[in-house]
Amino acid sequence: MSRAFVTWQLLSDSLRRGTPAMLLYVVQSQGSSPGRQGFLMAVDAHGAMQGSIGGGIMEHKLVLLAREQLAQLAPVSSLHPQIHSKAAPHNQSGMICSGEQTVLLYPVQTADAAPIQLLLAALQQAQSGTLTLTPAGIAFQADTLPAQDYVFQQKQEADWLYQERIGPKNFLHLVGGGHCALALSRLVHPLDFYIQLYEDRPELNTFTANTHAHRKTAVASYTELQALIPEGENHYVVVMTFGYRTDDIAVRALLGKQLRFLGLLGSQKKIEKMLDEYRSEGISPKQLQRLHAPVGLPINSETPEEIAISIAAQLIAVKNAPHPPAPSPVERRSQTT
């Protein structure tokens, strides 16, 4: 269950019980701020908390402020700029990591119960929608997306609007449902990825046992991936089938696609053989440069769980990079095929 879900669930439970509760939301961030745009937290009058807006002394003091406001008869929403530098003339957060963020403190109201329920349903079903926060309250519209993932506009102190795309923002396509795919699905599930798993052996025990993937698709041949996996900057693919032949089919189906990430699991020997074949067939170096092979950071991983950690770390590095980095040259390290 995601951090966002349990945070909104606390707010929903508080409204149901009649317990005053405060939503803390990072509506704007820049630089190396520990609280990124979209981070959220819930605090109720009895001391229950979920989520995070960046941690540290900043989070501590804003939680205390939220509790103080909840003790008032009619708390109102407020925006709190936080500058993470002791040199700042005002709005110091108490942290020195540099960067800035603006945190909304919003006391949830009875009228917010219905949109919060819609939002919870969307999160539970991995559906998309638009969350809107204004001084007037919380709104959620399913199956309607904003132009950008995050939008924050402020004209005056009490005239502002925040919108966010709720639902999957990044899609991880795992080709092959073996032990490594199961370990990677388990590890990545709590992260910001919607996991789609593809396997040409639907009876495979690790494929049927994988409850961490959001969607599982049985294919007759991995050539179908050309039609099943869309292009786009938010699509990541890792090929990890059971052997060379099926890896080759999958890679050929995907090499021409514009993807944020295309990785291939395998030994150095297998990958060198595959690349040599592609070069001899005239496949362009530009296409081959898109392939991260062997996939994963070079940490001498051996077990499926260790391999999953190395791949997850590489996916996070690519996802959070300002610009998609080019794949590194093929490195001399081995991984289990």
Image (spheres, grey):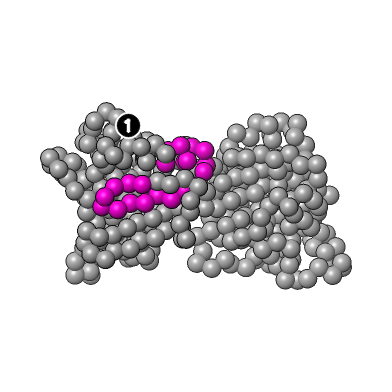
Residue placed under numbered mark 1 in the picture: 13
In the depicted view, which residue is nearer to us: 205 or 133?
Answer: 133
Residue depicted at x 80% and y 63%: 275
Q: Residue at x 29, y 39 (%)?
A: 111
Q: Position of residue 92 (x, y in %)?
A: 22, 62
Determine which quarter of the picture holds residue 271.
bottom right
Residue 133 counted in the magenta span? yes
Front residue of 301/97: it is 97
Q: Position of residue 107 (x, y in %)?
A: 24, 44
Q: Is residue 144 above or below residue 272?
A: above
From this viewpoint, is residue 217 visible? yes
**Location of residue 106 with respect to 88 vertically, above or below:** above
For image coordinates 68% across by 31% down, the residue present is: 208
Q: Which residues are magenta?
A: 119-139
> Would residue 55 be seen by someone viewing this image from the given angle?
no
Please provide percent x and percent y for residue 25. Answer: 32, 51
Q: Is residue 327 magenta?
A: no
